[in-house]
Image (cartoon, rainbow, N blue to C red):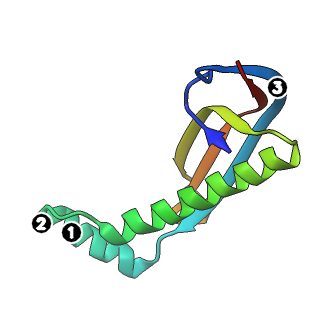
Amino acid sequence: MIITSANTLENRFVKEYKGIVTGEALIGANIYKDLFSGVRDVVGGRTSSYEEEIKKARDIALQSMIEKAEQLNANAIIGLKISYDNLGGTMGNTILITAYGTAILYEEK
């Protein structure tokens, strides 16, 4: 499966647009990670535990999007976008990661 943020694929012809596909993942931060992250930010370090959790959630969102494209018999996703939203409020420190793009069926030119 080819995935690109571009709206076209070089040397490929879009035979059919299959539709928009999405994948989502939620991550919640617990109090210990919050405290550790705050201390690291004050002393100028990187919050590697958060970075790792965000990477895992992004991978889950991308894989979910790919599976939906495969169900549509697509062989590529173009126009990829990834958004990160802090849900806050009643959800606490929950981050929603959404991957979305257009599933297509392409042919070589």
The label nearer to you, 3 versus 2, is 3
**Relative to 60, 108 lies left or right:** right
Residue 3 visible (yes or no): yes
Q: Residues within 10 Å of mark 1 (few under 14, many from 20)?
A: some
Q: CA distance from mark 3 to mark 2?
A: 49 Å
**Residue 51: x percent and y percent?**
38, 63
Classify 51 as above or below 69: below
* Residue 87: assigned label: none
Q: Residues within 10 Å of mark 2 (few under 14, many from 20)?
A: few
Q: CA distance from mark 1 to mark 3?
A: 46 Å
Q: Residues within 10 Å of mark 3 (few under 14, many from 20)?
A: some
The quadrant in which the N terminus is found is: top right
Residue corresponding to mark 2: 43
- Mark 3 is on which residue type? Tyr
**Residue 86: x percent and y percent?**
52, 52
Residue corresponding to mark 1: 40
Q: Mark 3 or 2 closer to N-term?
A: 3
Residue corresponding to mark 3: 17
Determine whether the residue tagged by mark 3 lies in a helix, strand or loop.
Answer: strand
Q: Residue furthest left?
A: 43
Q: CA distance from mark 1 to mark 2?
A: 5 Å
